[in-house]
Amino acid sequence: MNSAAVLKEVSPRVELPGVAVWFSKAFPLGALGKHATPRQPNAIPGISVGIATTLEREIIWAVAILQANAQKLRDYIELKGRIEENLAHGDFAEAQRILDNLTDNVCWSHGCLALKLFLISKIEGLESQKNWLVENILSRTNSPAAFFGYWLGVRQEPETDPQDFEANIVQSVPNLFTANEDNAFLRHILMARAASPEEEANLVQQLQAQSIIDMYEGLVSQLIDCSARHRESKRHYLNHLVPLMEDIGDWRQKGVGYLLSGNVDPETLDGASGWSASRFIDRLRRASTDPSSGDPAAYAEALGASIDMTRADRENRGILGSFAYSDVWSDMCVFLRATYDLKSARTSEEIILLNRIRFVSDKCPSPYVTGYVQQAQLPAAHHKALERSTFEEDYFYLARAVCSGNYHDAKSLLRKIEQDQIQEDPELLRLEIVLALENQDWPHLTKRLNAATSDNSEILHWVPYSDISTAISDDIIEANSGTPELAILLSRLAPLMGEQVRSQLVFAAELHLNNLGWDRPSEISEATLSSTPVLQDFVVSCFAPETMALSLIYLDAEEMQEERLMHLALVANASETLRDRCEDESEQIIRSQEISKAMSTVAESKIDCDEVGLRIWAKEKLSSKYERFRSFVDAGILPASAEASKELLVAVREGDLGSKTFEIPSNEATSILREIINELTRAYSLDPYFGLNSYLSLRIRHGTVAGQLRRGCAEERLLTTADSDGDRYDINQHWFDILCENIPVGVAAVVAERLGDFSKSLDALISEFSDKNLQILTDDKPHGLVATGFDDRILLGFFSDVISLKSMDDFLDAFSDLFWSNLEISLSKARAFIENDFRGAMMELFDILETGVQTDANASSLPPISDAIVRARTMTNQSIDEVSQWFSASKNSESSVFSIPDLGRISLEIAKRLNPDFKPIVEFSGEESWPIYYGLVTFTDVFGVLFDNVARHSGVQEPSVIISTDTSDAEVIKIQFASDCSDVGRALAAAQKANSKFLDGNYSSDLTAEGGTGLAKLSKIMRGSNSPQPFYVSVDEQKKTFNVHLEFTYVTLGSG
Amino acid sequence: MSIQDTSLSVLLVEDDENKKERILSYYGSAFPQDKVFWAPALVPGLRSAREIAPDFIILDMTLPNYEQSGSNGYNPMRPFGGREFLRQAARLHLNSKIVVVTQFETFGAAPNLVDLDSLDNQLRKIFPEHYLGAIYYHASMSAWQKKLNDARERC
């Protein structure tokens, strides 16, 4: 216990003031003296050490110090009033001039500092505010003034919503709301919060080490809070503080007097004492504000935000809340803060308290605010005045009913007031809902809230929607299942509250439906729906797919969505009003189904050839050889016996293939046929434009497989990237920051480094898999998984079959069938390799990582990183299954018709799946509904390359992409793909290179290679276009966009 | 007669193939007399539970809504799917005892991350009739097996 605490404890009560004054003078440099009147902002004190005695003794001690500085406080009160007046009128420059006078002649305080920061940001902008803070505090001291200065600066940023500020600071001081001796003080200074009874003495003790302004205002704010709550401790303030307030001319002692006695003088209640915030709100309620009425503009604007319906609730909170902290202890700001806090009040007790605080902060309070005074007794004269105004009378008695807990009267008055309202009143609606919730009046609550939110769901933010959601138990749902109201309300709460409310909603909706005699909404007849509008709303709102997914009626998503489509169609027919909404949603469901199917089609199209191109090439290059082959056959020189094919089939059927000898004869026909087949196989496999390998490169090796296999780890943010030479991988900062919160920094660093090593191993394994295995099997690629060569026995059968084929077209058809069926056999081995060998290698990396983390942590697991590894492992297993399924030679037949935006969305979905961090903002312009037939795979190739290009090279966090379509030309569809680029110089070079390569046709070497070859692959696709300029790239240097121009002719699209 | 000899009908609701195999294999050998059913997701699990009214349900916490290999369409992964299962089990007035077996120790995403102990406490409070507790499963450890035995004992 320090010496001041001892003196407070042992001094007789009557001598305590004298001891306090003596002590502060005797030890002017002690904690209780040296900070009383800071001359500079960097000298404003922080938290002091000390132990509180009783509340009364702490108050006596503090007031004695203040009394000794009464003249300074008198000056302060006078200047404070002038500052408030100028602030209220928005004259910030004049307010700043008076504040400078105050800090020069009285002293600095936390309140003055906050106001200074507010005014600088208003007058000169945020940058100047920050500069001032650095220059005057942060660069001069590391003391607590720096901490408070920083946070008060954050709080005073324009339009800051106090709730956001509070959430922000709680991240830095996580235990701010737990009771301890420092936290009450921090909450008081940073958020102007009153201390609880348990913390009160400690706060007053802390305030004694502050400037006299902070000490005084701290005590006054506690006086007001205690009085509004009618807490017993108020008597200490009344006995010791109020005389000082009277002495220095602080009118708030009068307001507190009214609050506690209920004897408000008639002049005050008549509204003749000056401008009143609460009466201004009344005028807004009656829509009788006149901009030229001389209202203080800035104050009026902030109050207007409390009742405004034109802006989003969040915006209004920012306007009201930020001004409410400008001059924190002014009456205006206390009133505004109470008004702001009313927007979050959850109980009638809280509403009463906040209105009482408004009462004390308003020199001329309205009858409504006055009605909240506990003992409010209206002078007879005023009673007559009230009777003249029904409006004021209703509001007054509403407040009285709330105070006395008379729900019935409050509800009737609210209903009466509501009938006269021209628009919803956020404050009264909240009051009505809070009362209904406290009184469990669910029929009224649901009906009232549904009516209020039917056209504007934003209104839900005005009411305690979280409390409402939590209060709706299954019992309440059952009790209220006779009407659809509760289910409809839940459907509006669900987007705000998520999973739990969806569960309540599906229960409520199906229960009500069952009560009406149906299991599914589609069972309702159109006639019934037509005649019952509330049923239409019920069906559309309460059976959204997100809700129906939790129903046990539907076996799977398809059945559930089909039901949704059916009942949406019914409602669309039954209701003119809801038709567009129903049709829009149906269209979205169908589109999402199509996109989902399309993604499967694209996934199944990875093993492909351009057979049209190959056929043209084959006819040009191999016709003469084929003619020679036919002449040998015609001369009776056959490549195999005509029966060989049948004999082979019999042997296969009997399982006796091994013991029989099937030899291909050696003659001229065989020799030339072998040549033709070898050339065809080589072209089918390796032709850089048309062959399998170019598609393997475009659709699998070019980033796709790496994205697919890294996806699970990327989603869990386990991966880091290599440095420029690729030798070292960065440590994982994301997980380091998370782990540091729970384990020693050293261990977190080891785990973070291990994740870097894991990333390196994973990338190396994927790269090796791509380079070695995802290749056509050749001498150069001996580990290639795609074997396109033929077994002699298969060839023998084919040789036998082709004898009867007369034309080259028939021969090429037969070869195509042979190639794909043979490929399917070889791909089954590829799938087995991927599912077993490659999966094993990948899982081993996870095993090593898991074991390593266990060793690092010296524990069997280290959540949450160990959970993330488990999830990544599961997702990687799924990714490997999907990669395996890519290796299928079954040719898909795409038949759906898509628009360009749809094709863009499908490609975007694929790109995002491959790269979870890729979040472009994509817009479409021009002709949006032009149908594209057989264009799915071509366009997903095109857009896939373009999105990949943006992800790799734009250098922008969330790049904008605009896909424009022009169909004005009868022969050509023009598409421009414009994306943000940060480095214009680099983009210009890339554009020039792509254009010249396309013009020269010099890109064949890039088609089967990987890395920086995306535009070359795109050039190859566009080579099939008959447009004079199918492909070129430009850069808009002003807009900083990289623009790829593509022109597709219909032949291009038709050929797929 | 000890509980070991009593035959129970059991439902395992689990989407992870490896974990499912491990649990089925262990459970089958430890309690061969029990009849074990399996469901791969939240909704199929609840439908099965409604149909067979099992004595004992072994439930994963993080579940897909519908079977994943099934049809296309809206099929979210539900990090707290087990909690929803318990909610609906209570609504269905099932008499089943339910144990959660999970390979995760945390659920959801920051800043709403919930750890297994907190979730376990929450579920005990909300569903005292059905909920037996949560078991942490790890493929390379066997502690879960003993805990699963204990849970079965309490059915």
Image (cartoon, rainbow, N blue to C red):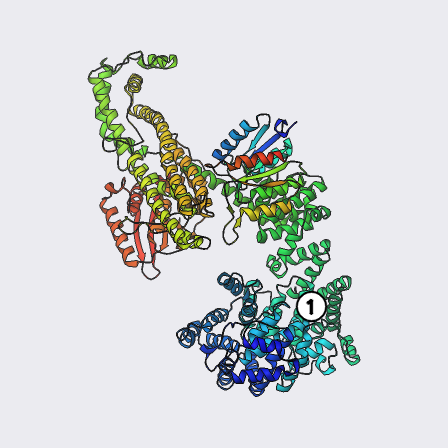
Structural crowding at the residue carrying mark 1, measured as other residues with C-alpha within 10 Å and reported as few (<14), some (14–19) or many (≥20): many
User: Residue B49: image x %, image y %?
Assistant: 62, 34
User: Which residue is under mark 1?
Assistant: A352
User: Residue A119: image x %, image y %?
Assistant: 49, 77
Q: Amino acid at mark 1?
A: Ile
Question: In the picture provided, is A967 more to the left or to the right than A264?
Answer: left
User: Residue A2: image x %, image y %?
Assistant: 54, 74
The C terminus of chain A lies in quadrant: top left
| Rendered residue at 40%/41% (across/down) | A851
- Of residue A1036 and residue A728, the one placed in the foreground of this image is A728
The N terminus of chain A lies in quadrant: bottom right
| Rendered residue at 54%/46% (across/down) | B116
Q: Chain of mark 1?
A: A
Residue at the extreme left: A668
Residue A510, image quadrant: top right
User: Residue A272: image x %, image y %?
Assistant: 69, 83
| Rendered residue at 23%/18% (across/down) | A670
Secondary structure of the residue carrying numbered label 1: helix
Residue B96, image quadrant: top right
Question: In the picture provided, is A423 more to the left or to the right than A266?
Answer: left
Question: In the picture provided, is B149 more to the left or to the right than A373?
Answer: left
